[in-house]
Structures are given as structure tokens and as C-alpha cells.
Amino acid sequence: MIPIATVFVDRDGVINRKLPDGEYVNSLDQFDLLPGSVEALAALSNAGSRVIVVTNQQGVGKGLTQPHALDQIHQRLRAAVAAAGGVLTAIIVCPHIEGSCDCRKPRIGLFVEAKRRYPQIEFSDSVVIGDSTCDIEAAGQIGANAILVTDEQGEPASGRSTVSSLAGAVELLLTPERADNEV
Ligand SMILES: [Mg+2]
Ligand SMILES: [Zn+2]
């Protein structure tokens, strides 16, 4: 099948365990990868998709997350995906406090930055995988497809699919008949 050209993946709650609201992943020992997430990222990459992590990290703007720690965390993530045989094209971060920038999702600055770096990106040929409404809203604004990762049961809203994990999202994308029907 033809792979999805670009897959934008949220970080907290999708790739690694999300901490309670108001808490931030500030060190490597708080960066707890969710089961199967690294393998799913590698599988996407191996299928030919450009895989770009787009993440809100206002802990940086609040002075709670040190930029150095964030770099360490993202190096670990890159290394883990590489060890699984894949590659992350980019990790693009909004470090700003809510309401102070044009890049904190649901704003679209992180996606615009990705397209600035990789002009071949077509948003209409992209998918956003995220666990919060800000991810889904951003996808809608750029005209990309969206997959919501959630534990909650319920009727999926129109225009997007719902799965329980990143691995489930990637399975949906890489299984042709399901991808055709549901994404
Ligand atoms: Mg999230
Ligand atoms: Zn920002």
C-alpha cells in the first residue's frame, strides 16, 4: 500500500505516560515509554512515513522543565526508535506558556515549522495522532486526518478514528482495508 506520507505524533499520553495535569516530565526517570509505542514509531518509519513528534511543553516556559533535560529525553526517544530499526524525522517542541505563542497546539505553528523544514509535506496527506482535543483541533485546522488515542469508550466523532494506543493507531494506518474505511 501507499504509506501515509507524514505522520505527526503527540508525545505525552501517546508515546510516553502522561503525568497528572500541571506536572511535567522533567527528567529521564519520569519519561516512561508506553508499551509498544517505540515499535509502532519504528514500524511507521519503516513503512515509508515521515514521522514527526509535535509536543506542547509549557513546563519549559514555566521554568519547571530544563531545556537540557528535554534534550536528554528526546535523545533517549530517538535512540529507542533507532534501536527498534526506525528513525524520527524531527521532534518539534512548543516551550511556551499557554496563550503566549502561535505554536502551542491547538495552534498550528509546530506544523507550519515542520513544513518549513520539509517543504514536501502536504497536510492533506498527513495524519495527526494525539490524545487530547488540542491535537484533533490542530489536525482540523491544517486539513489533516486525525486519530485520537483514548481509554474512553464511546461513539467516535465524525471525521476521526479512535484507538486505545499508538500501536493501535499505527495498525490502523498500516492495514490497508481498515485504513481505507476508517481514516
Ligand atoms: Mg498528549
Ligand atoms: Zn509555542
Image (cartoon, helix red, strand yellow):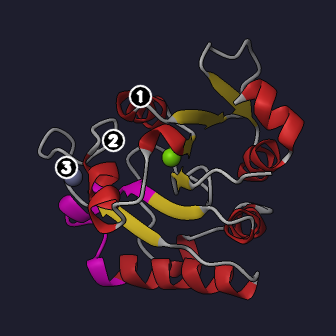
The residue at the point 64 percent across, 68 percent down is: 32
Question: What separation in Å lies between label 1 and label 2 (alpha carbons)?
Answer: 8 Å
**From which residue to which does the magenta span run?**
54-68
Q: Is residue 7 magenta?
A: no
Circle 3 SS class:
loop
Question: What separation in Å lies between label 3 and label 2 (alpha carbons)?
Answer: 11 Å
Q: Which residue is mark 2?
A: 105
Q: Is residue 163 left or right of residue 7?
A: right
Q: Are marks 3 and 2 in contact (CB under 8 Å)?
A: no
Q: Are marks 1 and 2 in contact (CB under 8 Å)?
A: yes
* Neighbours of disc 3 within 10 Å: few (<14), some (14-19), many (20+): some
Circle 2 SS class:
loop
Q: Nearer the viewer, mark 1 or mark 3?
A: 1
- Is 55 located above or below residue 134 in the figure? below
Question: What separation in Å lies between label 1 and label 3 (alpha carbons)?
Answer: 18 Å
- Choose the circle earlier in sequence order: 1 or 2: 2
Ligand 1 neighbours mark 1 (CB distance < 8 Å): no
